[in-house]
Image: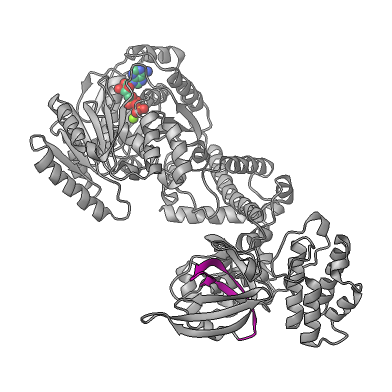
Amino acid sequence: MNPPEAQLRKILELERRKGYADTAVVGGLDRYLKNLIQRDNLGPRSPIMESIMALPTHGYASLSRDQRQSWLLRTIQLLDGAVQRPVTAPTVQKARASTAAKPKRQPVPVAAPDSPSALERPVTALRGVSTALAAKLARLEVTTIQDMLFFFPRRYNDFASIRPIAELIVGEEQTVIGTVWSANETSMGRRLRGTEALIGDETGVMRVVWFNQPYVAQQLRTNERVVLAGKVTLYKGQKTLDNPEYEPLESEELLHTGRLVPVYHTTSGLAGRTVRRLAKQALDNYAGALPELLPQDLLSRNRMLSRPAALRQMHFPDSWDDLKEARRRLAFDELLLIQVGVLQRKREWQERGRAQPLRLPEEMRRGYVESLPFALTGAQQRAMSQTLADVARERPMSRLLQGDVGSGKTVVAAAALLAATASGAQGAMMAPTEILAEQHFHTLCRVFSCSERTVSIATVRPSYLSKPLTIALLTGSMAASVKRKLREQIAAGEVDIVVGTHAVIQEGVDFRRLGLAVVDEQHRFGVMQRAALREKGRNPHVLVMTATPIPRTLTLTVYGDLDVSVIDEMPPGRKPVETRWVPPDGRDDAYEFVRGQVQQGYQAFVICPLIEESETLATRAVTQEFERLSSEVFPEARLGLLHGRLAAPKKESVMRYFRDRLLDILVSTIVVEVGVDIPNATVMMVEGAERFGLAQLHQLRGRVGRSDVQSYCLLLSDSPAPDARERLRIVEQTQDGFALAEADLRLRGPGEFFGTRQSGLPDLKVARLSDVPLIELARTEAARLLEADADLSRPEHAQLREEVSSLWERVTAEAH
Ligand code: ADP
Ligand code: MG
């Protein structure tokens, strides 16, 4: 296609998109065609002439809409038929029902991607990619063709609206088609050089400036037709384009202008235009090689785009709606791979081995419940029934017990441990830190009303049990001889319940008959870690407890291999923690309040602002705050300091001092050990509260209010933006951890709960973990797929099987 033909084709496409209103060019199509004939001296056999001859005397303007449509489509076909190479429209658009006769625009691959393995080729297989360019792309983690296809834009510029110069609207992103009148390199102040150009069309002339890009002057030739896109500004009262995207009108297809233009992350020395061109090239030549992941019936049932179509729309969307569809499809793929993996894993360990059924005879259960100094809440009873029913089966239990801090999860876990011992099996209870393990040991001793005990071992004779119950505490810092002795007893089956840290139990203990593992406070314990735990034990039942309220979407993904019990009811009589936002000028009053509580014999936490970027900065900040508070604010009190840089034993001993009331105030970063019970602490003071997530604030607040004394949470925030103030108001007003978690997920995304890496989840490029309907859809479809074809052995599931396994291999490798 020669330049006039290419230009006409673009205009015709535009005209079609605008609904055949004769508005594609200023002055009308007839005038344009007339100029074209005069200017370009077309031969009689040219497709353009042939088309023009087909028009009536009064031209295009005199045709009806339908006549215009058929003339225009025929002309496009003529133009396309006149060339060998593929031609694409300036702006790709979705065919409306009335324009179904859309010409085919399948690009012809340069290097025939006969097999999917073409996708594994290095980016240097793309035209124009030198090793130097490949090195830059590698910095963006793009090394293969496939990487390029899945290197998605971070946003899009809406340059879809094309306007004549006279009609440009200041402040909007638009596209202009014009002729270069002049283009010169200019100096723009000290050491700053750029390009200044004048661009004209039938309606006017405008100034266009590229700061810092003197080379653009060489790329624009006088009299050349160009397309420019950018935001229109006013300069000295004149409309101006600053640093617009530009491309010659002759280019095959508009990439940088005249459409929704993708904007990619780049790196130094790599122009956005280059990435865009490479993405286009990869799409045209290789997208078709990408095998479909999903069976056809699933696609049509859910009205989903094919994968190549979704990729195309993701990079070069025809409209915002098309982009949405593309996102939906690609996000669904990501979520489905997770769901299939998670469900397969669940089924695998459920089928791999039988677990020992653990039964708690009814009279023992009643005896246990009646021995407790309080009545169980309805939620506790429910969770206990679900758990006991699960462990009584041969299918190994995998249950998540969720409940806010203080909701009473331990008594539920204890019932399951009791079931284990009643069935002649052993139970393990694991905590992330030694101090929490100690705490669990004490709690279990209390729950089972034990009297005879040493530091590490307790023997209990609850009236409802026929034989005594032995509970051991095993932590890393115990004397080696004690540990060795305990291990022997555990291996010999002389110990019924072992409480300890994850590390100690997972790495050093040989159980005689491990029937149940209780894993506490494990929001850092992902799918992979759970799988590892199963690998070790001979398929014990597993109960995971967490005090972090987890939104349902996350339980479906990160905890997707688990069944869930929720304790959503607090024991009666507990006083809600009074929560207040403290304005900047209220700081002194807040300190005074803390002093008052300390004088009454209570304790307080002071949490320093969240500094995520650097542990060093966080340490320095908390240390300075500690010194300031010790010397200037609370010289009379005993202060302790806690941060992530302290060695684990040091951390634990600071927590112990605080627990044992040797300290009044604990100044800390967010590391404050989750779950540690300090009933005597009544104040939680959070500095820079606006930087924390709602769920985090709720967790911090849960450190206090653990007795019947009124407790307080003071949220200090020096410069809260209105929306930050709003978020803090939500924390002030609601005590419901789940509501806060859902709000958090909406407001700040899932990073709040776990980095995906820690969670044993793959990085998600497109999907959002807050998208409940799509996650549920993926869950349903995954279950359906596996029900029909459990190991995905059917040919139409081959691709899916391969991608699921390679995804999980990657995740496994990262989790180790
Ligand atoms: P968490 O869910 O945070 O682990 P715990 O199991 O440690 O909570 O229980 C917190 C406290 O509440 C414990 O001292 C426990 O004995 C007490 N508790 C548990 N259930 C009830 C109940 N139904 N009524 C009153 N107190 C309860
Ligand atoms: Mg607890």
Q: Residue at left 34%, top 14%?
A: 374
Residue 338 position within the rendered picture, expressed as x and y whole percent measured from the top left? 55, 48
Residue at the left extreme? Answer: 636
Q: Nearer the viewer, residue 756 or 216?
A: 216
Quadrant that contains the N terminus: bottom right
Q: Residue 493's quadrant in the figure?
A: top left
Rendered-image quarter of ligand 2: top left
Residue 252 position within the rendered picture, expressed as x and y whole percent measured from the top left? 69, 76
Q: Is residue 83 visible?
A: no
Residue 246 position within the rendered picture, expressed as x and y whole percent measured from the top left? 58, 74
Is residue 115 rendered to the left or right of residue 473?
A: right
Residue 319 vertical position relative to residue 434 in the rendered view, above or below: below
Residue 35 sits inside the magenta stretch: no
Residue stretch in magenta: 222-246
Q: Nearer the viewer, residue 299 or 797?
A: 299
Q: Is residue 787 visible?
A: yes
Q: Residue 71's quadrant in the figure?
A: bottom right
Q: Nearer the viewer, residue 228 or 77?
A: 228
Residue 227 sits inside the magenta stretch: yes
